[in-house]
Image (spheres, helix red, strand yellow):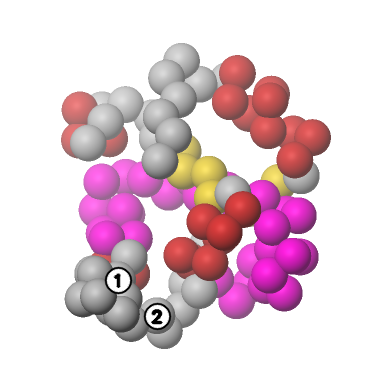
Amino acid sequence: MAAAFGRRVTLLFMGEGVTALVPGQANGPLGQKGTAPTLEMLEMYDIDTLLVEAEALVRFGLAVEGLMLPARAVAAAELPALTADHSLVLTF
């Protein structure tokens, strides 16, 4: 929503959240919508900065090259400085 109003948006996927970027996911067992259609629309809103927690990628056996969207891996030690660079931080 913020991107639609001209705000700079960076998405950071941490912990299990990195698995949302694994390609080929289907709807959830209770009929929940998959996240892929929403994530594929990010470019339409000029959201092109995606970050993933490097330690979470390792924990789940993932590589940044295998994710469904281009992302940059960042170490947990970098996260405080990255969030401090943004005037508004929303957590989901």
User: Can residue 40 be spotted in the picture?
Assistant: no
Q: Amino acid at mark 1?
A: Gly
Q: Horizontal and vertical percent for residue 38? A: 27, 60
Part of the protein shown in magenta: 38-67
Looking at the picture, tell me which residue is in the foreground, 31 or 76.
31
- Identify the residue shown where x is 50% and y is 21%: 86
Binning the other alpha carbons within 10 Å of mark 2 as few (below 14), some (14 to 19) or many (20 upward) gives few
Looking at the picture, tell me which residue is in the foreground, 65 or 30.
30
Q: In this rendering, would 91 be left or right of 5?
A: right
Q: Horizontal and vertical percent for residue 43? A: 32, 54
Q: In this rendering, would 62 be left or right of 26?
A: right
- Identify the residue shown where x is 32% and y is 26%: 7
**Does the magenta-highlighted stretch encompass residue 46?**
yes
Q: Which quadrant of the figure contains the N terminus?
A: top left
Q: Amino acid at mark 2?
A: Gln
Q: In this rendering, would 16 be left or right of 78?
A: left
**Circle 2 is placed at which residue position?**
25
User: Can residue 18 be spotted in the picture?
Assistant: yes
At numbered mark 2, what does the secondary structure look like: helix, strand or loop?
A: loop
Q: Say if mark 2 contacts mark 1, CB within 8 Å.
A: yes
**Circle 1 is placed at which residue position?**
34
At numbered mark 1, what does the secondary structure look like: helix, strand or loop?
A: loop
* Labels 2 and 1: the sequence-earlier one: 2
